[in-house]
Amino acid sequence: MSVSEQQASSGAPEQPSAPSRQATGRLYGVGLGPGDPSLMTVRAVEVIAEADVVAYHSARHGRSIARSIAARHIRPDHIEEALVYPVTTESTDHPGGYRGALDEFYEAAAERLAAHLDAGRTVAVISEGDPLFYGSYQHMHKRLAHRYPTEVIPGVTSISAAAARLGTPLAEADEVLTVLPGTLPEEELTARLSATDSAVVMKLGRTFPTVRRALERSGRLPEARYVERATMAGERTGALSDVDSDTVPYFSVAVVPSRIAAGGQEPEPAPDRGEVVVVGTGPAGPCWLTPESRGALAAADDLVGYATYLDRVPVRPGQRRHASDNKVESERAEFALDLARRGHRVAVVSGGDPGIFAMATAVLEVAAQEAYRSVPVRVLPGVTAANAAAARAGAPLGHDYAVISLSDRLKPWEVIAERLRAAASADLALALYNPGSRSRTWQVAKARDVLLEHRAPDTPVILARDIGGPGESLRTVPLTDLDPAAVDMRTILLVGSSQTRRVRRDDGTEAVWTPRRYPER
């Protein structure tokens, strides 16, 4: 019972009790574990035994899961403080809305506990799971821990309990485990589920239909497992795809377990599951990889690609890697499609965006042949080298621009020169791919001369090399000073239009941009 109830029953005036142990009491945040009282830690039991006050949160119906877990350790002489939420999921007419109502409640609840602490009483705020992991206690901790001596007693989380009840490892080796609240928007859930190795989605209940759609859209639904009331009475587990959304309570979680641990349970290759996904890895390392591409790489049975790009993809146990030289695009595409036709999930790894001078075209050309037309092919976008370089420089491609490859390996130089003249005469900014290599040393000088027929000598040219990589460099020079010796295959050139501006800022950096507004003639 509360302090006021005890005083009322004895007829005594409401006077604060004498300090029982010290000038101010001690605050404990006590984790009780996932539900089974036997999973409480020894320290949690000790703290409850030593406490003068046991506080717990509950909804307006008055039932508290935390209290039911700790019931056997709560004595008649304990002062109990039931912190009853004014709202849970329903709407409210509070002037500050739902968040305002809760903030007001937390402030009032914290002051109720502060009164006990000021009177010298030890207060144990009990919380299911772990107090600082989506726990109600944390709201008291933020308001009181800086004012009173405080100790937090960790508890077994529902995540650990769910994995234990499923008998399935959550993460192994270098796998990343992502914990998500089901209250996130569907698009955000989909992106994060696509990008991670394994996941747990908390707070289901009303969010279950959204979570299920996100799992399906991210391709993770076949792996997903469902756990309800882990270690409690009424526990339920099973394949999440089989669960009726109308039966899902708040105290349930979705688990996408370790892919490595499940490696031996992968289905055998079958024609109806084979596909080719062409993945753009961006210009450099994992920071440039989209969540969708990251998920596709993780889900693949086989990775096919140029060795340099394959090296950007983490090695995963059980995943086969097929590296090849950079000049065998058609052969690589045919190999990938053959694997998919036999039931393998294949990721063809491409740098930058796969549709810009990269592997998407090669795969689609081969897939157009009669033998491969039934093989599913998807293309996932990536950050392009042009966009990455432009972002580093400022916004040189902020207006209309053209993208041209200077490589004459697959088209005559005459065609390249004609396109350069056309783009330059139209006053387009330019992104020039493949400007030079060990075997192609004269194209940059030729391109410079062609552009100077239409551009001023001081037109800004950005030399961006290995953007995002360890050898990244960025330099801006006038077009007339463009030196072919400073260019290699890891360099992309961005050439400004007549409107492109180059300005040095007060901090010493330089910004290059092309205005979006073009002057009227």
Image (tube, rainbow, N blue to C red):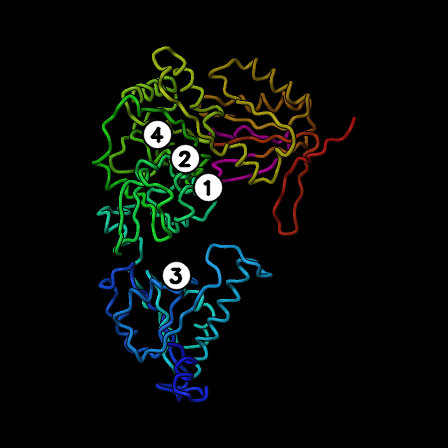
Q: Which residue is mark 4?
A: 307
Q: Which residue is mark 3?
A: 135
- Give the CA distance from mark 3 to mark 4: 47 Å
- Whichever of labels 1 and 3 marks the residue nearer the N terminus, that label is 3
The local crowd at label 1, few if under 14, some if 14 to 19, many if 20 or more residues have their Cα within 10 Å, is some
Q: Provide the secondary structure element on which disc 1 rests.
A: helix
Q: Provide the secondary structure element on which disc 3 rests.
A: loop
Q: Amino acid at mark 2?
A: Arg
**Circle 2/circle 1 CB separation < 8 Å:** yes
- Give the CA distance from mark 2 to mark 1: 10 Å
- Give the CA distance from mark 1 to mark 3: 23 Å
Q: Examine the structure image and report whether residue 466 is included in the region drawn in magenta.
A: yes
Q: Quadrant of the N terminus?
A: bottom left
Residue 83, percent from left and from top:
43, 68
The local crowd at label 2, few if under 14, some if 14 to 19, many if 20 or more residues have their Cα within 10 Å, is some
Q: Amino acid at mark 4?
A: Ala
Q: Amino acid at mark 1?
A: Glu
**Mark number displayed over residue 186:** 1
**Circle 3/circle 4 CB separation < 8 Å:** no
Give the farthest residue toward the right.
Answer: 521
Residue 486 lies, with reference to residue 159, above or below; the image says: above
Q: Which is closer to the viewer, label 3 or label 4?
A: 3
- Give the CA distance from mark 4 to mark 2: 30 Å
Magenta segment: 463-489
**Circle 4/circle 2 CB separation < 8 Å:** no
Residue 187 lies, with reference to residue 417, above or below; the image says: below
Q: Which residue is mark 2?
A: 217
Q: Amino acid at mark 3?
A: Gly
Image-based side of 353 in relation to 370, left or right: right
- Whichever of labels 2 and 1 marks the residue nearer the N terminus, that label is 1
